[in-house]
Image (spheres, rainbow, N blue to C red):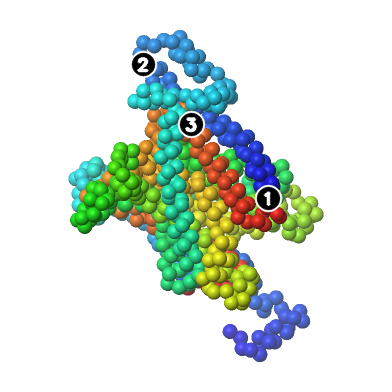
């Protein structure tokens, strides 16, 4: 019951934060450029026509009034139209949601894999502290942590061609498809049957997921190692060992579960950072997700698309943080009762 | 070093209060302790050496280098040779000078971002942690507000608002959305420090809010502030590189390592030196700063008795 109330209270606080946040975004976006700039520079258009267009688009009102107009439309489902050239005045909502779905798939795949591998490596490094394995894992973590994501993506993309040649030479192209590792968007994939679909999707998702994973995995492994070391030094672990519980049971059934709690919350809070990573990786692999959408919208001064983009991302970050708090409350009974 | 007898004599004299002040062993300040621990941290020292080398090279080498970064009269896509150690770009510019100039700007921007975000973060965090109640609520809400907007998107849009793409604009916009983590950490530390007696004593002697914060709280948080400021530089280098790589950061005539990579990454297959040059420098900068930050963290940690091998 406490938990439900807590969630409701958090949601209630999130709403004004989201409103003020969207207002801040609106002020920023409204100043990125003049939507009528092109019109103004055309010869033969007099001031009256420009003023009339301004009035029609509502641009002659103040920022606050325009914000509330936008908000009204937004909440009722009308997210506006994309005014960028070459977009044929496409409605914003399906565009942004389609891009978001693509990014979300990538983020979830990468997050889950990074968590699983990071946690396993962290546990191993903690259990065998100061061993060769620990130093190797630590060095790898530091190295990956210091890598720019787009460079990892570029290197993976560059060597995908060689890997594909290797796959082909091994004769696996019948099973895995030729080329197997794809470096472009998975939209145009058509699969025949589950096995084929699996091979094709793995091939398409593998490289971008690896790029994002490489870096977040490093953070998780370090965190899990630290958390695990702390737990392994705790009294209840010592009691368990004194009772004669086997080492693997102590590690997995007692220490691991408790060490996992702070890492799970890191997982949810890291969502924002993972989204940023996905955005950058997408631009390297040419996926039509939030990354390419952002670059296009900023370059072409497309305010409605930018607002839709910002609201979707801000909303997802809030949901992820809420999820983190909920998870923490569920996993750690001390939070609920205390 | 004095032998055992004279040592005993000194100690007894000190206990009785009969020693002249010059004979007492020199008290070690926190700064000296931290420095000593840091100097023994091999990885941090090696990283410091490498970083200093990179900084010096990027500032001094262009003065002596045979080619200017602007000179695009060289053959396009020349192979790495004695004349052009990393080859030339498509427009015929020498890669080494591009990297040197890019490094200058990357370091400058990262340092600026770190300083700005640390100052803003520490002030806001300390105010929130010390004053609590309304100020804490307000600052926490503002922090949440800035946290829901991804830094790269906000920086891209703001850079467009200001229009210029100069390095200081990019630094400003990155710092505007990069202070939140430091603020949170400082707030937690300030909160726990505010419970200590010396704060009560200061308040009882009539110290005002700002005096307590800047003369009492901040000096006690120097450790965490320094470590986080250092790590913020590494984060800023990568964030700026990412922003410039997608084309929304630094614009010509200013440049940065991210921009250099953007202009040359398509050449990975045929001319790897053009990509790996700036890439390795970028990774080295980020790696060394991260190691230094880790070394500083160990040095400031009073519980860490063991010096890292």
**Residue lying at the far right of the rendered structure:** B204
Query: Label 2: chain?
Result: A
Image side of residue A43 versus residue B4, left or right: left
Q: Earlier in the sequence, mark 2 or mark 3?
A: 2
Tell me the SS state at disc 1: helix
Q: Nearer the viewer, mark 1 or mark 3?
A: 3
Asked whether the residues under marks 2 and 1 belong to the same chain, the reply is no
Is the residue marked by circle 1 packed among few (<14), some (14-19), or many (20+) residues within 10 Å? many
Tell me where residue B116 appears, x and y as whole percent. 54, 46
Residue at (61, 88) in percent of width and height: B3
- Location of mark 2 (residue): A42
Q: Which mark is residue A308?
A: 3
- In the displayed structure, would residue B213 be above or below residue B166? below
Residue B81 vertical position relative to residue B49 in the rendered view, above or below: above
Report the Cα–Cα distance between label 2 and label 3: 29 Å
Find numbered disc 3 in the image and state the secondary structure of the residue it sits on: helix
Q: Above or below — where is A42 with respect to B255? A: above
Q: Secondary structure at mark 2?
A: loop
């Amino acid at each position: 019951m406490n938990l439900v109330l807590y969630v409701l209270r958090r949601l209630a606080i999130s709403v004004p934060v989201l409103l003020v946040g969207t207002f801040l975004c609106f002020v920023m976006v409204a100043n990125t450029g003049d939507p009528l700039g092109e019109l103004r520079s055309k010869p033969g258009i007099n001031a009256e026509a420009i003023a009339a267009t301004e009035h029609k688009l509502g641009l002659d009102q103040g920022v606050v009034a325009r914000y509330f107009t936008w908000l009204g439309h937004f909440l009722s489902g009308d997210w506006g139209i994309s005014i960028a050239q070459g977009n044929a005045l496409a409605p914003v909502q399906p565009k942004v949601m389609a891009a978001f779905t693509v990014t979300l798939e990538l983020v979830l795949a990468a997050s889950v894999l990074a968590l699983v591998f990071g946690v396993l490596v962290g546990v191993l490094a903690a259990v065998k502290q100061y061993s060769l394995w620990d130093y190797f894992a630590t060095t790898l973590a530091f190295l990956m942590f210091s890598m720019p994501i787009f460079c990892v993506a570029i290197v993976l993309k560059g060597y995908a061609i060689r890997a594909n040649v290797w796959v082909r030479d091994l004769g696996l192209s019948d099973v895995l498809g030729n080329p197997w590792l794809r470096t472009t968007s998975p939209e145009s994939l058509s699969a025949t049957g589950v096995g084929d679909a699996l091979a094709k999707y793995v091939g398409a998702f593998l490289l971008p997921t690896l790029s994002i994973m490489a870096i977040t995995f490093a953070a998780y492994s370090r965190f899990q190692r630290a958390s695990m070391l702390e737990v392994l030094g705790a009294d209840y672990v010592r009691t368990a060992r004194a009772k004669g519980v086997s080492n693997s049971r102590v590690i997995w059934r007692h220490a691991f579960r408790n060490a996992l709690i702070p890492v799970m919350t890191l997982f949810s809070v890291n969502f924002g950072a993972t989204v940023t990573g996905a955005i950058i990786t997408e631009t390297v692999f040419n996926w039509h997700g939030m990354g390419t959408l952002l670059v296009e919208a900023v370059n072409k001064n497309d305010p409605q698309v930018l607002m839709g983009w910002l609201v979707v991302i801000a909303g997802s970050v809030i949901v992820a943080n809420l999820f983190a708090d909920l998870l923490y409350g569920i996993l750690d009974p001390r939070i609920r009762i205390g | 070093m004095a032998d055992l007898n004279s040592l005993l004599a000194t100690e007894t004299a000190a206990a009785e209060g009969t020693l002249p002040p010059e004979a007492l062993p020199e008290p070690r300040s926190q700064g000296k302790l931290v420095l000593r621990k840091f100097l023994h941290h091999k990885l941090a020292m090696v990283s410091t050496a490498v970083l200093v080398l990179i900084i010096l090279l990027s500032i001094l080498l262009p003065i002596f280098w045979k080619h200017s970064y602007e000179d695009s009269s060289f053959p396009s896509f020349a192979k790495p040779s004695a004349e052009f150690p990393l080859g030339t770009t498509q427009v015929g510019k020498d890669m080494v000078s591009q990297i040197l100039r890019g490094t200058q700007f990357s370091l400058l921007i990262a340092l600026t971002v770190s300083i700005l975000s640390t100052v803003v973060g520490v002030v806001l965090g300390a105010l929130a942690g010390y004053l609590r109640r309304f100020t804490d609520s307000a600052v926490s809400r503002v922090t949440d507000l800035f946290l829901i907007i991804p830094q790269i998107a906000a920086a891209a849009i703001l850079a467009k608002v200001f229009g210029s793409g100069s390095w200081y604009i990019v630094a400003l916009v990155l710092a505007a959305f990069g202070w939140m983590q430091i603020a949170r950490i400082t707030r937690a530390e300030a909160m726990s420090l505010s419970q200590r007696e010396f704060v009560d004593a200061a308040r009882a002697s009539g110290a005002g809010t700002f005096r307590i914060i800047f003369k009492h709280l901040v000096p006690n948080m120097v450790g965490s502030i320094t470590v986080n400021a250092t790590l913020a530089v590494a984060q800023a280098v990568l964030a700026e590189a990412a922003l410039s790589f997608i084309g929304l950061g630094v614009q010509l005539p200013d440049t940065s390592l991210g921009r250099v990579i953007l202009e040359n990454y398509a050449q990975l297959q045929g001319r790897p030196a053009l990509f790996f040059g700036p890439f390795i420098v970028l990774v080295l900068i980020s790696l060394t700063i991260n190691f230094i930050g880790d070394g500083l963290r160990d040095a400031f940690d009073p519980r860490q008795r063991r010096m890292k091998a």
